[in-house]
Image (tube, helix red, strand yellow):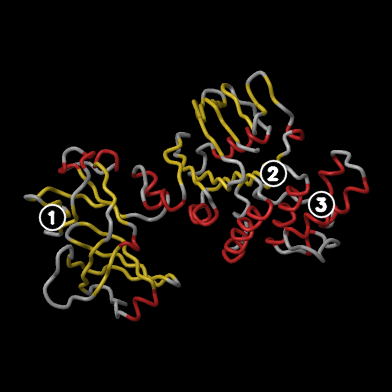
Amino acid sequence: MSDIRFRSVRKSYGDRTVFQGLDLHIRSGECFVLVGPSGCGKTVILRLLAGFETPDEGEIAIGERVVASPRHAIPPEDRRIGVVFQDYAVWPHMNVEENVAYPLKMRDVPKPEIAPRVAQAVDQVNLKGYEKRLPSQLSGGQQQRVALSRALVAEGEVMLLDEPLTNLDANLREEMRFEIKALQRKIGATILYVTHDHDVALAIADRIAVMDGHGIIRQIGTPEDVYENPADPFVCRFLGVSSFMETERRGSAQVLRGTDFVLGTPPDRLGSPSEAVAAFRPMDAVVSREEGPLGEGQALGTVERVSLLGPIVDFRIRIGVQVLRCQVQTEEAVARNVIFEEGETCVVSFHDPKWFSAAESGIEEA
C-alpha cells in the first residue's frame, strides 16, 4: 500500500511559517491534486514528501513507513518516489534511452535488467521508436514524456508532479493532462500533482485539495463536489470565474440589491438574510432575448461587453448597479440568437446560487 499521510506537519523558513498542523491523507492509487495560488506552500509539501526538505514538526508516512520527521529522514533515493519537474530536467546530451536509464544506473541496477525496464517505461509513455533521439530533437510534450518515463522506470510506489505542464502550449497541455490520467490508471501508482491551474486539477484529479495563500487547506473532495459545492468564497473564486452579488431582504424574498430580481432563499446557517451574498458561475446564467413579460426569477440586464472565446460567448451584463459575467456555449448562442450587440437589453436568470455571508465573501454591507 502507498497511502501518504502528513500528520501535524509544520514547516518554516526563518520567521515565515509556510503551514503548521498540516494533516493530509492521500489514498493509495489515486491521483490527488493540490491546487492553490503561487507561494501558498504546494511545492513545499511535494519537496517534503520527496525528501528534499525536512519537517520542523510532525511526520510524513508512505504506507506503514515513516519517511520524515524532525529526528528521522529516509534519503530521497530510498523512498521509491518518482519526481517530474516543471522544466522537464532531462539531460540535453543524453538520448531518450539514456535519460530514462539514468536513475537505474545511479542505483547500480545490474546492466541486464536496465534495457527491458527502460523499454517498458518508454513504451508506457508512447515514445517507442524515439529511443535514440536527443531532447533537442523532441517537442515539448515529448520531452515531458521522457521525464515521466524516467520517473516510471524506478518502479516507485509514488509519483510527484510539480507543475509539469506549465511550459507547454495550450494544445499540448490539454493533450498531456489526459495522457497523465490515462497513465495513472494504467500503472496504478499514487500521484501527487501540484498546480495552480484549476482546469488541469478538475480534469485529472480523483480528489482535489484547495490551499489558500496562508498554507491552509480549505476543502478536499472530488472535482465535482469541490466545484459544485465550494466550502467558502475562496474555493468558489479559485476554481473558476464567479460573480458575487449583494442581496437584500424584501418581504419574504431575497433580491439582488437595488432590483426586484428574486434570487431565492439562503440557507439557515448564514443567520441574518440581510448579510447574504449569492455567487454564480458564468455558465449557470441563462441569457435570452426579451420576449414579453418577465417570468419568475428573471431580470432585465444591459449587455456591456461581448467576447467570443472560441467554444463560448462571454458577456458582461449590468443588472441594476451590479455587473455580472455570464457565458453561453457558442453553438447554443447562435441557435438561440443571443449573440447580442453591446448596449442591447437581455433577460437573465440563474441556476443554483451558492450562498455565503457578506463577511466571508469580502463584500461589506452598505
Where is residue 89 drawn, in percent x and y?
73, 49
What residue is pinned by disc 2?
83
Q: Is residue 1 above or below residue 306?
A: above
**Label 3, on which residue?**
99
Q: Sequence order check: which comes first, mark 1 or mark 2?
A: 2
Q: Residue at x 23, y 47 (%)?
A: 277
Name the outermost residue toward the top.
Answer: 71
Identify whether 113 is placed above or below 340. above
Label 1–label 3 contact, CB within 8 A: no
Tag shown at residue 258:
1
The type of residue carrying mark 3 is Asn
Dot 3 or dot 2, earlier in sequence: 2
Number of residues whose C-alpha sits closer than 10 Å to that of mark 2, classed few (under 14), some (14–19) or many (20 or more): many
For image coordinates 21% across by 47% down, the residue present is 266
Vertical placement of 139 versus 248: above or below? below
Q: Quadrant of the C terminus?
A: top left
Question: What amino acid does circle 1 point to?
Answer: Gly
- Please name the amino acid that badge 2 sits on: Val
Residue 75 image position (x, y, % from top left): 74, 29
Residue 274's x, y, as percent? 15, 43
Could you tell me if the residues under marks 3 and 2 are in contact, i.e. CB atoms within 8 Å?
no
Q: Label 1, label 3: how many angstroms apart (C-alpha)?
A: 64 Å
Left or right: 320, with 150 as reference point: left
Q: Looking at the image, which residue is at 59% across and 58% down?
A: 177
